[in-house]
Each structure stands twice: as structure tokens, then as C-alpha cells.
Image (tube, rainbow, N blue to C red):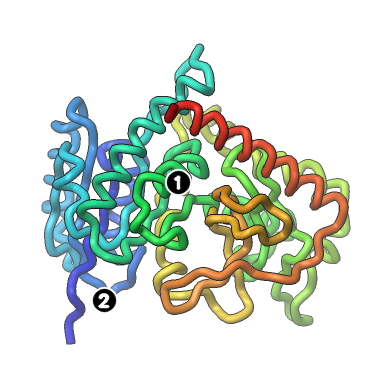
């Protein structure tokens, strides 16, 4: 029996990430090859013409799973009945801008979009925030959409997770699909902590730990971490644009695993509402290792945290606490 279409909202849909993301959703990369979708695309009025061009291309691509397209600059129209919201739109930091200026702009955007989701989205709508500062934007959205369960509001650290998998696979010359259980802790920023302490690689002799196979703690505790932390900046330097393709692909990975579930014995990284696990202050949106089942995520518990890791977890939590305070000051 054919499935009912799922309504998926993409904000900032005429931008680079949105342009890469919407065909992936329409092709079934996000929700599966048997799941019809109706795309809701939102952007700001100056991007209205570009947005209409994206809609034309979606029609021209003749995606069998795509059962409708809503392309609009009206946030209420965009949010009506949506089951999944991917919040890509935001105000980017421009040269000479102070952090508080950027935060103030994004607080205003996310307050407005949260209110529209609160009033018009489908019950149990799942939300993924991509736009930076992603963790804190998600926190603001949670504040102004109180009827959306806190477990349904997340931010994207899967891109960092996938980057970490990629660095390990390149270092060891193994397939990326054979590496699992890296962790991104904390903020989607340069304080994030890419952690391989519990990561493994499938080999012909069975599963081996990444640390055992790499056999170079100096690299794992130094260059590996900084490479993942700074990967976005490296891509901007090389491409002259921010990472769009990988961000869009990671957003699909995040939602797919959340909805469909993670493989047994495998965890992924998601920015989620902290309950105090691993002594991370409750009330932050913080990246943890999670497993997903039946449309719900759960933080992986009981992992050992050594002193090196503890310091890294604390540092990124401190930054998130500062961001939270800054964001709340913009609400005053």
C-alpha cells in the first residue's frame, strides 16, 4: 500500500545548501525510496525569484516521489502541516560584525520561525537546525515553540561526525563504511571535540579500535581533532564557498537515522537537549553520541571519559553556556 506523503520544510531553500538538499529529499535520500514527499521551501523576499527557479528545476527533474512543492516567502504558509523541518536559513556572520550582532539577527529569525512552527506544524514535527550558530539557534527555537517536544528539536553535528569518519578512513586507507562510533561532543564550532576513544574499524581479523590501528596518539589528539574542527574553513578556502554538498548529505543522514533508526551497535552524533548526561549542563543543545529507534533518539550511556576528553567536553560546554547567555541577552 502506498505511503502518505511526508511534508518536509527546508528554510533558506534558494541558498547553496538548500539547492543541494532539496533534490536529495525529492529523490528519497532522506526518507527512503518508497516514501513520497511534499516539499515546503521558504526563503526571504529578495530570494523569491531564485526560489521560483528552484521550484521549476524540481518540476523539470520529474522526481517520482515528489508529490507537491510549496515555494514561498511567507513563514506561516511554509510551516503549515509540516512533519519535518530542516532549518537551513540564518543570518551569516559578515566581516566586521560582532558575535552579539550575529546572535541578535538569528534570535529574531528563529523566534519568528519557531512561533510559526508552534502554531502551524503537524503534531510531533521533527526539527533539525543547520544554520549557525546551530546549537544556540536550536535552543532559541525550543524556547519559542514550547509545544514541540524538546526531544524533537535537534541541531546538525552529523557533518562533523562524517568528517571524522572520513579522516580516519583516509588515514588507515579503509572504506568509510567500515569505521564506526566516532563521537562529536559539544558545539558545532571550533571547540567541538571529535573523539575516537570508542571508535572501531571492521577488518579481516575482526573489529579493531581506531587507536590500535592508527597507533599514533599524537596525531589522534592533535592534527586529527584540529582538521575536523577546521574542515569548514578549509573548504571555504579551497572552494570560495562554504560546504553545501556535504552539509546537505549530512542533514539527510541525520533525519534518516532519526526516523528509520541506527544499525544495531552503531551510534551517531546529534546536537540534542542535554539532560545532564556526562556532566554536561542540562538545558544546553549539545552534541552527544546517540542511537535511534522508532523515531526516537537516546544518548549512549556509560562510556568512559578520560581526563583529556573531560577537559574537551568542559571547554565546549563553557562556550555553549556563553552563547546561551548571549542569546538570552538579545531577547531582553
Residue at (24, 46) in percent of width and height: 116
Q: Position of residue 52 (x, y in %)?
A: 13, 39
In the picture of the structure, the residue carrying the numbered disc 1 is 138
Q: Are marks 2 and 1 in contact (CB under 8 Å)?
A: no
Q: Is 328 left or right of 315, judged from the image as shown?
A: left
Closer to the camera, 264 or 310?
310
Q: Position of residue 164 (x, y in %)?
A: 64, 53
Q: Is 287 left or right of 85, judged from the image as shown?
A: right
Residue at (87, 47) in percent of width and height: 218
* Residue 32, quarter of picture: bottom left
Closer to the camera, 195 or 302?
302
Residue at (14, 31) in percent of width and height: 49
Q: CA distance from mark 2 to mark 1?
A: 30 Å
Q: Which mark is residue 129?
A: none
Q: Which mark is residue 34?
A: 2
Q: Is 220 left or right of 86, judged from the image as shown?
A: right
Amino acid at each position: 500500500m502506498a505511503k502518505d506523503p511526508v511534508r518536509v520544510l527546508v528554510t533558506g531553500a534558494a541558498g547553496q545548501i538548500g539547492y543541494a538538499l532539496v533534490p536529495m529529499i525529492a529523490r528519497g535520500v532522506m526518507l527512503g525510496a518508497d516514501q513520497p514527499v511534499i516539499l515546503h521551501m521558504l526563503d526571504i523576499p529578495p530570494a523569491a525569484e531564485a526560489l521560483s527557479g528552484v521550484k521549476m528545476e524540481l518540476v523539470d527533474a520529474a522526481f517520482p516521489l515528489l508529490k507537491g512543492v510549496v515555494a514561498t516567502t511567507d513563514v506561516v504558509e511554509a510551516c503549515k502541516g509540516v512533519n519535518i523541518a530542516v532549518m537551513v536559513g540564518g543570518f551569516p556572520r559578515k566581516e566586521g560584525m560582532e558575535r552579539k550582532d550575529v546572535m541578535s539577527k538569528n534570535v529574531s529569525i528563529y523566534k519568528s520561525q519557531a512561533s510559526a512552527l508552534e502554531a502551524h506544524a503537524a503534531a510531533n514535527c521533527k526539527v533539525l537546525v543547520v544554520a549557525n550558530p546551530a546549537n544556540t539557534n536550536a535552543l532559541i527555537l525550543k524556547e519559542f515553540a514550547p509545544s514541540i517536544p524538546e526531544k524533537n528539536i535537534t541541531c546538525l553535528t552529523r557533518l562533523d561526525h562524517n568528517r571524522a569518519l572520513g579522516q580516519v578512513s583516509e588515514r588507515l586507507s579503509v572504506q568509510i563504511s567500515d569505521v564506526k562510533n566516532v563521537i562529536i561532543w559539544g558545539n558545532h564550532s571550533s571547540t567541538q571535540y571529535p573523539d575516537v576513544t570508542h571508535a572501531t574499524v571492521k577488518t579481516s581479523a575482526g573489529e579493531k579500535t581506531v587507536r590500535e590501528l592508527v597507533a599514533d596518539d599524537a596525531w589522534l589528539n592533535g592534527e586529527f581533532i584540529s582538521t575536523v574542527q577546521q574542515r569548514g574553513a578549509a573548504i571555504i578556502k579551497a572552494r570560495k564557498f562554504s560546504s553545501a554538498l556535504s552539509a546537505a548529505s549530512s542533514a539527510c543522514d541525520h533525519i534518516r537515522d532519526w526516523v528509520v533508526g541506527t544499525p544495531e551497535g552503531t551510534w551517531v552524533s546529534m546536537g540534542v537537549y542535554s539532560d545532564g548526561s556526562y556532566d554536561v549542563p542540562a538545558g544546553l543543545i549539545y552534541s552527544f553520541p546517540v542511537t535511534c529507534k522508532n523515531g526516537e533518539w537516546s544518548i549512549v550511556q556509560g562510556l568512559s571519559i578520560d581526563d583529556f576528553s573531560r577537559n574537551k567536553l568542559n571547554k565546549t560546554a563553557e562556550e555553549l553556556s556563553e552563547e546561551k547567555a548571549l542569546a538570552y541577552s538579545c531577547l531582553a
